[in-house]
Image: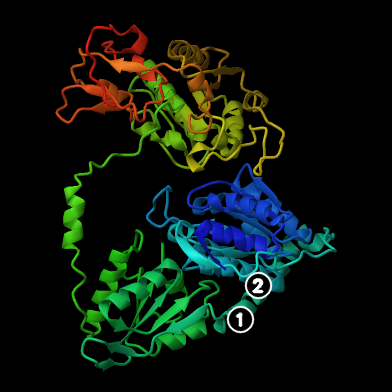
Amino acid sequence: MPQLLLGNDAIALGMIQSGCQVVTAYPGTPSSEILAGVIKFKKKLGADVYTEWSASEKVALEVALAASWSGLRAATTMKQVGLNVAADPLFSAAYTGVVAGLVIVPCDDPGPHSSQTEQDSRLMALTAKVPVFDPSTPEEAMAMVEAAFDLSERHRIPVILRPTTRVCHAVQSVDIDDPAQKYKANGKAGFKKDPQRWAATPVFRLKLHHELNAKLQAIEAEFEKSPLNTIFNSPISNSLNGELEIGRIGIIASGVAFATAQESLAELGVSAPLLKIGTPYPLPRKLVSDFVSQFDRVLVLEEPDACIELQIPDRTRVSGRLDGVVPIAGELTPEVIMSVVAEALERAGVSVPPPPDDATLASIVQSLKITPRRPRLCPGCSHRSAFYTVKHTFGPNAIYPGDIGCYTLGTNLRVVDTCVDMGASVTMAAGFYHAGRLIGDKRPIISTIGDSTFIHSGIVPLINAVHTNARFVLLILDNHTTAMTGAQPTPANDFAADGGAATRVPIPDIVKACGVKFVRVADPYDQEPFESLLKEAHAFTQSPDGGVAVIIADRPCVLYDDTPVKSNPMPVVVTEQCDGCRYCVEAFECPALVLRPDKSRVDIDYRTCVECGQCIDACYKGFIVPKELAVSDQPLAVSN
């Protein structure tokens, strides 16, 4: 029965139908909806599945690995940079192997659209020696889940399913024949001790490495005959003039690039031999080499990097990312692939029509006169209030290490100077302090990190900073959820992934346990007391017995819980005296503050305003006031 499914939902349903009993995850675009989908389908189908938003990707993989060793099919999901965090257990699990199927789903972000890198998880898999499936559509991703579990169990090896953003967030009509689970868990499940494997010393690890290499050879032999690796189209035929061009050019493609290449060839009116690779590692090298040998040139289309191309034994006739024929960075959008394929065909002597004329569409888009706007924090976001007060307190010369989350947008407010990876704001702050101490740089250091990110990667850096006597202010922006990726719970919440009860781990207790002596909790909406607290914290860092000072800016995300705002609304107006100086728009940057096209004044956009009242302090001239205090007979210019 066909059903429209988001790609991530298709993967989730594939897990349920494959009998997966443990699914763990750490949220991150484009992977976040997978665990949510698992929870939705397990309730709908009555499946007994344990689900968990883990504290980090490393934790998520290790929980899933333990489940596999206990005889239960398990899966874990994350985004591509999350696989970096999970690298330790990934590499080790490849050696030790698994019992029940273990499928790891790192979702890559070519572009990147929402990531600090566009790294290729297939290359991580190649280094770790873990097989990879590379789906091109949501339907194929769903089918590959079962294939991945089957391969994992037959060869006792973890398997990676690597979708990209365009698969994760595409919607496709998927045939769902039987909603019941296709796989039943082993009734004899239970961890069986085997120290020489599960706790192998270096001597036994060498033996396990030999086993792993043998597994990969066997898997490559299977992939040579797999229907996931298929040649489409006969020798090149140009439908424009009916001529046959044999042996000039072939194309190898995988993932979304394969589907896009098919569409591009159809639009160009050319039917060229196209080898689809669904299993990029270990590459079925004989199949690929035989294909390459038939042509003068072979074009490899894959993203976000060169994985298939790197494994081709003889690349004399091959073009792709490595020689720059395919752009060496960026997403392979339909426009890019169309251009690359057309140019490759022309170089091979195959005439192709000019690309479709999109002048009409371009004209329509241009007529919309859409003004591009950079991403901004939401109206009412407490991070904005915290950042505004920090900037007002310490000015432009302080050092502001930042972190990964909504609050990275503090760059717009000029209070985020660095962003490396999750947890780095704490370690960078410590590093700046120790470096500054050596060279006499005494600028204040105020680092920022979110609640989920602090639990994920900030605790150990904080312990290190305390131990090494670093001195800086750490601002933990606690909005009670993992806001940027869809409001998933954190260990600081009292409910679990599926809504069930969970034990809350209070962040202030964690901070105190790290050895921090100055720990305060404050509401950033209370801007004057918050500023006083910031000054007190900085003074502590400079005192003889001082050290790291931690302030927890505690207020829920307005999209997650708007109760505090609704229970105490503060509607505001902009008075007629507003002269359009733009200070509030630039320094506070709330989307509800709108500068008129003629730049004569600022208005309130009441369609987006949440009546938090935080912008009152953002106008140093006093032209933004509470509505109740406005002069009743004075005309006010506002947007409706």
Picture mark count: 2
Callout 2 crowding tier (Cα within 10 Å): few <14, some 14–19, many ≥20: many
Please tell me whether residue 469 is drawn above or below residue 456 in the rendered image. above
Residue 151, which numbered label? 2
What is the quadrant of the C terminus in the image? top left
Q: Quadrant of residue 296?
A: bottom left
The answer to whether residue 86 of the structure is visible from this angle is: no
Q: Are marks 2 and 1 in contact (CB under 8 Å)?
A: yes
251 displayed left or right of 510: left
| Up/down of 234 relative to 625, above or below | below
Looking at the rendered structure, the kind of residue marked 1 is Glu
The residue beneath circle 1 is 222
Q: Residues within 10 Å of mark 1 (few under 14, many from 20)?
A: few
**Residue pictured at 60% horizontal, 66% vertical:** 145
Residue at disc 1, secondary structure: helix
Q: Position of residue 236 (x, y in %)?
A: 32, 88
Q: Secondary structure at mark 2?
A: helix
Mark positioned earlier in the residue sequence (2 or 1)? 2
347 shown above or below 53: below
105 or 309, nearer to the observer? 105
Which mark is drawn over residue 210? none
Residue type at numbered disc 2: Leu
